Amino acid sequence: MAKEKYDAVWQPDMLDRFPMNPNVMVRDLDKERLDLLLTYVAETGRSESLSAFISGIVDRHPKYLRVKELFETFEAYRRIGQAIYEQWREGNVETIYDLACGHGLLGILLAWRFPTLRVVCVDRERRPAFDHYLEIVREQAMPMENVEYIERDFNDVDLGPRSYVICIHACNEGTRDALEMAGAANACFAAMPCCIRDRLYLRRINHLDDDARYTAAVGVIAGRYGAYKITAIDQRITNRNLIILGAPAPAS
């Protein structure tokens, strides 16, 4: 899809104007901050269509959109979307799997950006938010026939060839299991680890504060699963902000 050009309005310091309490809904913002948030969405996605999509959710289904989740999802979308694009150009991606997808907004955004790729959102329970998001985006003349939802433990999903595995904030064994699946399928992956319990990857990480312990643990995970890059979203959004990117080793 063609991207529109913008004279940027959004600046990183504007993030401080928004509450990151996980209980604050987008509908609770005053008009000035809501308008600024929609500007952020348009500039991040480089499309007014995405701004209209979010505005439609706020108007019709306001109880399903939180400020923190929106920023977290769009920042992940920006970084992971670029990684997917790079791997797609190398011929490594046909299907995107968003494992433990929760509300499914990230999967819908990726299906919108990559209409020729299949996007599979997987979680144990299909949340109403997913269908409300899909309803709004389809009303904007986007058929979104390339996205689907599977209600299942993601460990029971079979990954096909040229898969891209995404796992955002799956706790403890969730990230490990997703990366094991990606490795077994020789798939690309993007993971943003959340809780990392001792003995999952190392016996223990001692004498570090929480942020340092998290950073060290993510480094261990990246090394174990052969990541080629670690990137991050803004720590003001979440302190579990590191994203690990991996891809199949090139054939010798």
Image (tube, rainbow, N blue to C red):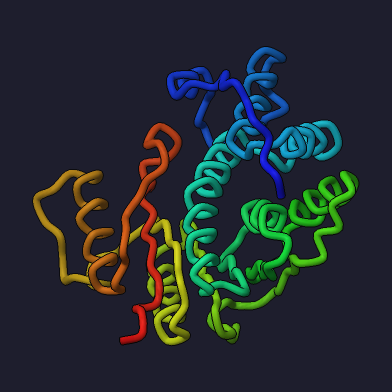
Viewer-closest of 169 and 158: 158
Image coordinates of residue 93 in percent, x first then y, are: 56, 72
- Which residue sits at x=72%, y=53%? 112
Viewer-closest of 117 and 165: 117
Viewer-closest of 162 and 251: 251
Q: Is residue 156 visible?
A: no
* Quarter of the figure with residue 225: bottom left
- Relative to 250, say whether 137 is above or below: above
Image coordinates of residue 241 in percent, x first then y, are: 38, 46
Image coordinates of residue 216 in percent, x first then y, are: 20, 55
- Which residue sits at x=20%, y=52%? 213
The C terminus - image quarter: bottom left
Q: How many marks?
A: 0
- Relative to 28, say whether 150 is above or below: below
* Quarter of the figure with residue 85: bottom right
Q: With 51 as the anchor, is 168 left or right in this view?
A: left
Q: Is residue 90 visible?
A: yes
Image coordinates of residue 131 in percent, x first then y, are: 81, 56
Residue lying at the far left of the rendered structure: 207
* Quarter of the figure with residue 125: bottom right
- Relative to 218, say whether 13 is above or below: above
- Which residue sits at x=15%, y=60%? 205
Q: With 5 as the anchor, is 145 left or right in this view?
A: right
- Which residue sits at x=51%, y=48%? 76
- Relative to 31, say whether 178 is above or below: below
